[in-house]
């Protein structure tokens, strides 16, 4: 279980790096008025205005990777160390997008609700989250220790190990 948790966190961080690269490209192309991590950081730091504040970039980066890693941890735990199909990761990215863009961001006032938001911005964020979910699954599958898929040859051996674990039995001690 601990390995799945760590693999999920690492996979989430790696996927967040991929997603962050896409956000940077979208920001430079003018598709985002302000990347969500920066907006969240700006809302939490004291002071008003649109000028950057000290620590804003660091806080937004830490928060973004923490969120991506924690979401990766959830899928890592749910996968229980098994191979995850890529479409599941893409769907998971869609779920995280839905949670963030339809739930979290509007509820704290970071962005307008989905129907009132700019369609281009939402399309960019959706594409980024689909990419994030795909990258997460690829990382999780790469980080797995058991490389072979659970096959009919491997399953009986695992079942037998669960039924009869190899626990050492102590030798009887003779009385003196």
Image: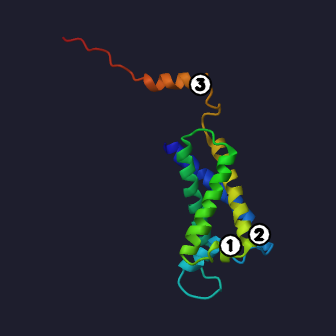
Give the label on residue 26, or none. Answer: 2
Closest to the observer, 156 or 60: 156
- How much space separates mark 2 and mark 1, taking CA atoms? 9 Å
* Residue 175 image offset from top left, x and y in percent: 20, 12
Most foreground residue, 117 or 48: 117
- Circles 3 and 2, Cβ within 8 Å, touching? The answer is no
Q: Residue 56, percent across and down?
A: 61, 76
The relative height of residue 80 versus residue 155 in the rendered view (above or below) is: below
The residue indicated by pointer 3 is 154
Q: Is residue 107 above or below residue 175?
A: below
Mark closest to the chain's N terminus, 1 or 3? 1
Distance from the alpha carbon under mark 1 to that under mark 3: 46 Å
Q: Residues within 10 Å of mark 2 (few under 14, many from 20)?
A: some
Q: Tag 2, which secondary structure?
A: helix
The residue under the point 24% across, 11% down is: 174
Specify whether 56 is left or right of 167.
right
Whichever of labels 3 and 2 marks the residue nearer the N terminus, that label is: 2
Residue 35's label in the rendered image is: 1
Residues at circles 2 and 1 in contact by the CB criterion of under 8 Å: yes
Can see residue 55?
no
Q: Secondary structure at mark 1?
A: loop
- CA gap, disc 3 to disc 2? 45 Å
Secondary structure type for disc 3: helix
Q: Residue at x 55, y 87 (%)?
A: 47
Mark number for residue 24?
none
At x 54% / y 57%, what residue is drawn? 70
Residue neighbourhood size for the residue with mark 3, other residues' Cα within 10 Å, grouped as few (<14), some (14–19), many (≥20):
few
Classify mark 1: residues with Cα within 10 Å, few (<14), some (14-19) or many (20+): some
Q: Residue furthest left?
A: 176
Quarter of the figure that contains the C terminus: top left
Q: Residue at x 68, y 60 (%)?
A: 129
């Amino acid at each position: 279980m601990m390995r799945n948790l760590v693999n999920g966190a690492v996979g989430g961080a790696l996927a967040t790096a991929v997603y962050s690269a896409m956000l940077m490209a979208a920001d430079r192309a003018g598709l985002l008025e302000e990347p969500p991590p920066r907006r969240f950081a700006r809302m939490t730091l004291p002071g008003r205005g649109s000028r950057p504040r000290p620590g804003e970039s660091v806080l937004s980066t830490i928060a973004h990777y923490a969120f991506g890693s924690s979401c990766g941890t959830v899928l890592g735990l749910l996968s229980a160390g098994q191979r995850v199909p890529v479409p599941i990761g893409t769907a998971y990215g869609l779920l995280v997008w839905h949670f963030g863009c339809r739930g979290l961001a509007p509820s704290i006032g970071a962005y307008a609700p989905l129907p009132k938001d700019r369609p281009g911005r939402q399309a960019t964020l959706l594409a980024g989250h689909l990419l994030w979910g795909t990258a997460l699954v690829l990382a999780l599958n790469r980080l797995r220790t058991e490389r072979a898929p659970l096959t009919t040859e491997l399953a009986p051996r695992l079942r037998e190990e669960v039924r009869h674990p190899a626990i050492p039995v102590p030798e009887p001690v003779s009385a003196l």
